[in-house]
Image (cartoon, helix red, strand yellow):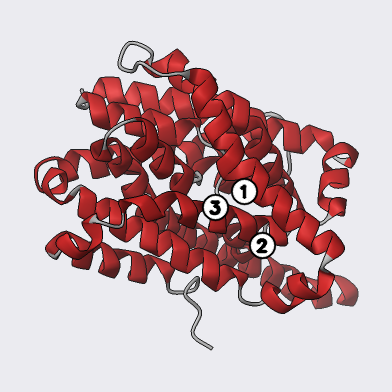
């Protein structure tokens, strides 16, 4: 069966180009972004079990470090990049908003492909998603307060509706309607990927003119932001004494944001241009995540082969 998730980077680029070339049919779909995000969050909830919540309390150290880095590194780096590149206000707000969001569910897939700690990744995504309800509005005000007039409580309640309710609904379906969860499980990655692609197409269409004038600087900011998160996430985790596998997991989790949430919040509270960094992030972080996951998986396989080659020699000696 065709996997949208497997070919996501290529599809994201193709759909973005189509939406940019002919945006008119999609402009009227702006109101679909929030329902699509709710669908993505519900799919995330369907992948979770009560045991995932218990795991947070059993192994708190690595999870806590990852979540702290998530909300420490990404908004700070976004703010520094916005200053360094002198981004227009809308792009600066959008980039900081993406940085202040929780980790994205795509990080769990990339962690699996990289041979990382999937349980740690899922736990970090879960915990950062819950903390993000409070921290995302607060961090946006902290870093972009001079650029925005924002009702922090209104954004907090919006995030709770967009994130907490659909995730809780998915978890409850798993608990009380297990047959439904099992029947949908194999299709969840494709459903979520299709919803993200639809959000991406709508945002690109809404920003077709802005992409023509600000696309290069916006893309540069997003790429720098993502690569900084991956790099700092890995080396700060290593500096704190975590294993290579844990550090790779944290790097992917820190570097890959819930850009769908960032886009929905930008459209709801700001301008379509503020959603542009989130749209570009959706494309780029899947490309960079796929590349780094492949590279780390190759490194791991090389080490395994070397160890297997050394074993007969050790036995002979």
User: Is residue 288 depicted above or below 265 in this figure?
Assistant: below
Relative to residue 298, is residue 61 drawn left or right? right
Disc 1, disc 2: CB below 8 Å? yes
Q: Element under label 1?
A: helix
Quadrant containing the N terminus is bottom right
Quote the CA–CA distance across marks 1 and 2: 9 Å
Is residue 315 in view?
Answer: yes
Nearest the viewer among 130 and 240 is 130
Q: Element under label 3?
A: helix
Residue visible at 27% across and 69% down in the picture: 14
Nearest the viewer among 200 and 307 is 200
Residue visible at 13% across and 64% down in the picture: 21
The residue that label 2 is drawn on is: 115
| Mark 3 or mark 2, earlier in chain | 3
Disc 1, disc 3: CB below 8 Å? no
The residue that label 3 is drawn on is: 38
**Which of the 4 image quarters holds residue 141?**
top left
Relative to residue 281, is residue 239 drawn left or right? right
Residue visible at 26% across and 62% down in the picture: 16
Nearest the viewer among 85 and 280 is 280
Relative to residue 91, is residue 75 drawn left or right? right
Q: Residues within 10 Å of mark 1 (few under 14, many from 20)?
A: many
Position of residue 164 measured from the top left corner of the image (x, y, whole percent): 66, 42
Is residue 118 in view?
Answer: no
Position of residue 131 measured from the top left corner of the image (x, y, whole percent): 66, 31
Nearest the viewer among 103 and 248 is 103
Position of residue 262 measured from the top left corner of the image (x, y, whole percent): 43, 40
The residue that label 1 is drawn on is: 248
Q: Nearer the viewer, mark 1 or mark 3?
A: 3
Quote the CA–CA distance across marks 3 and 2: 29 Å
């Amino acid at each position: 069966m065709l996997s949208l998730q497997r070919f996501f980077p290529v599809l994201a680029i193709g759909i973005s180009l189509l939406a940019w070339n002919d945006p008119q049919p999609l402009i009227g779909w702006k109101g679909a972004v929030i329902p699509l995000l709710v669908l993505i969050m519900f799919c995330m909830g369907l992948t979770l079990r009560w045991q995932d919540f218990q795991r947070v309390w059993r192994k708190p150290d690595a999870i806590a470090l990852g979540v702290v880095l998530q909300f420490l590194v990404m908004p700070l780096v976004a703010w520094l990049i916005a200053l360094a590149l002198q981004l227009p206000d809308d792009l600066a707000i959008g980039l900081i908003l993406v940085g202040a969001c929780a980790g994205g569910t795509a990080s769990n897939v990339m962690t699996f492909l990289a041979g990382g700690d999937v349980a740690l990744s899922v736990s970090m995504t879960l915990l950062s998603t819950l903390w993000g309800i409070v921290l995302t509005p607060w961090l946006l005000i902290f870093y972009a307060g001079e650029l925005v007039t924002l009702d922090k409580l209104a954004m907090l309640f919006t995030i709770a509706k967009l994130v907490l309710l659909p995730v809780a609904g998915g978890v409850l379906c798993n608990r009380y309607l297990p047959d439904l969860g099992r029947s949908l499980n194999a299709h969840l990655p494709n459903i979520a990927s299709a919803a993200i692609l639809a959000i991406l197409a709508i945002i690109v269409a809404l920003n077709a003119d802005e992409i023509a004038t600000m696309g290069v600087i916006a893309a540069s900011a997003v790429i720098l932001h993502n690569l900084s998160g991956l790099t700092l996430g890995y080396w700060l985790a290593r500096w704190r004494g975590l294993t290579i596998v844990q550090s790779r997991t944290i790097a992917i989790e820190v570097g890959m944001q819930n850009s769908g949430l960032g886009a929905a919040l930008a459209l709801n509270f700001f301008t379509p241009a503020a959603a542009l960094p989130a749209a570009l992030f959706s494309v780029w972080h899947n490309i960079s995540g796929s590349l780094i996951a492949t590279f780390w998986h190759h490194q791991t396989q090389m080490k395994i082969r070397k160890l297997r080659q050394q074993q007969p020699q050790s036995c002979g000696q």
